[in-house]
Amino acid sequence: MTVDEQRYPTVYESDELTAFRKNYLTTQETLRQQGLSFQRHYAASVACAPSRASLYTGHYPSLHGVTNTDGAAKASNDPTMWWLEANTVPTLGNYFKTAGYRTFWKGKWHLSHADLLVPGTNSSLPSYTSTGEPDEVNEDLYLEASRLADYGFTGWIGPEPHGSNPLNSASSAGAGLRSRDQGFADQLVALIQQLDAEQDPNPWLIVSSFLNPHDIALWGFFSNLSATAQQTYDFSVGDEVPFKLFIKTLFNQTHKEDLSTKPSCQLSYRNSYRKFFQPIFAGLPYYRFYYQAHLNVDRQLARVYQALMDSSFFDNTIVVFTSDHGDLLDTHGGLHQKWYGAYEEAIHVPLIISSPLFPENNGKTADMLTSHVDLLPTLLGLAGVDAEATRTQLTATHTEAQPLVGKDLSALIRGEATTGTLETPIFFMSDDDPSRGQNQNNFIGLAYNSVIQPNHIETVVARIKGKVWKYSRYFDNPQFWSSPGTPGDSGVQDETIKELGTGQDNEGTSTVRCQKTVKLTPAADEYEMYNISDDPMELTNLAGVAAYAAQQKKLESLLQQQLQQKRLTPNSGTVPGQ
């Protein structure tokens, strides 16, 4: 079971918000009480597409190639949007199908652009009516087309729940309209009941991929105007969500940061956000809506989990719950969503592994550092599947079936190992830059500058002498220049063109003034370093502070080790600039 954009509870969370989680997010609470909760679990990348591709392949964007998320300046067919190509890096579905499992996917995909398209357009074929109700004819088309078959999955019904269309939201379509998470739950309940009725002895794996609390990304000035004037959206919040969400004195420390000691791209992002998305006007209604979205998705999770509990195979089933990434929610000087940083709010996410097979884990927690890339080897281990032998089989059909880089945590879950014996540093990377692409115009058509460089990130999180540390390098990656390659080589440069204004129209033509900038040398690297144990809100950047020079050197060495071990690159060819 996966959700989208749900962060791990923060240190500035109020008692009221903690009680809300316990009393109203009942599915997640049940999984916690009947499973093992990992308290320091991290996404491998951001945002949606890079994170999901990493979670479901067990590798990082440097290998699987899904570096960016479509949206803002990039459409799904933007020249700098690379999707996961079939028969390259195998997925969770490929591994388990090879091992003899029946493998199903329901809900958000976002590893490739799998939508059925209207010929001659880039428009996706909807599987729902104008009110959001299921369109059975088009649902059957998606099922028969089996667009995820090459990735090892069947059962997916598109289109991708992506973009600003209220009918593609998780739960925020206006009055009389139906959103997508409800439909995903319907599909999953029907699938579980069908499998139960068939009584096929072969094992199965189901990915239940929900969209909320991602609806927080829809919130803004214009969407709220539409909600009020046209009832397009429904951003209502119930009485269950408390008004006191945060400890004010703590929250204000992060909310009011001036970012002067942080990497420069963060201030650039804060000032640019309203241009390539929409003005937010953040405040209590915005914050409360985020947690309403938690409640909305938990209710759909409950329907699926109840169907599983009612089935004949519940006692022999393992449930994994996590989120692709978190959300900044107006912290760190007023940042939103999940880009241009490696803050806890954005990359620290929940992970629960629950099963009647392991009752000794009920209600327990593990404080070890874990990553999304650990999930594939762990699930294979729990299923008794030889990961290396299966990978070797997959090399016959996949060009990049390289050894998995994550940890197999199955021995810990079975009680055969301790956290101390398994813990290693974890690695995070991001090349996602939604501010740059072919559609670099704001909501009224004016061109805007992309977020400044350096904004590509490599991060190590490690426990040193009992303290958790995080160290990040921000760099200008020439892989993403307009003419990528090794800086200094002939023809390698980054050329950007910005419209400055439109001149006088003349018989159907117009003169447009533009500014062209050509860069030959990358921007200088910048760094962040935090003692997460002592500074869990990441307020004090210790990078470059003389008193911590030795610690920075140690973390830099660990980062280099992580790069060598986990930042793999394709064997099948050269990626310019890598």
Image (cartoon, rainbow, N blue to C red):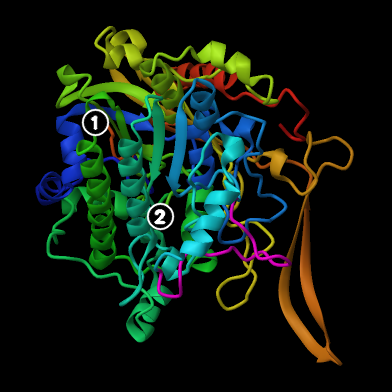
> Disc 1 on helix, strand or loop?
helix
Q: Residue at x 40, y 20 (%)?
A: 378
Which picture quadrant has residue 124?
bottom right
Q: Is residue 10 visible?
A: no
Nearer-N-terminus badge (2/1): 1
Which picture quadrant has residue 329?
bottom left
| The magenta stretch spans residue 117 | yes
Q: Nearer the viewer, residue 262 or 332?
A: 332
Q: Is residue 350 left or right of residue 577?
A: left
| Residue 279: percent from left, percent from top | 43, 70
In the orientation shown, which residue stands out farthest toward the front? 198
Q: Is residue 192 left or right of residue 167?
A: left
Q: Which residues are magenta?
A: 114-132
Relative to 340, residue 116 above or below: below
The residue pinned by badge 2 equals 335
Q: Nearer the viewer, residue 41 or 531?
A: 41
Amino acid under disc 1:
Phe
Crowd band around label 2 with a 10 angstrom C-alpha radius: few (<14), some (14–19), many (20+):
many
| Residue 49: percent from left, percent from top | 53, 45
Relative to 228, residue 320 above or below: above
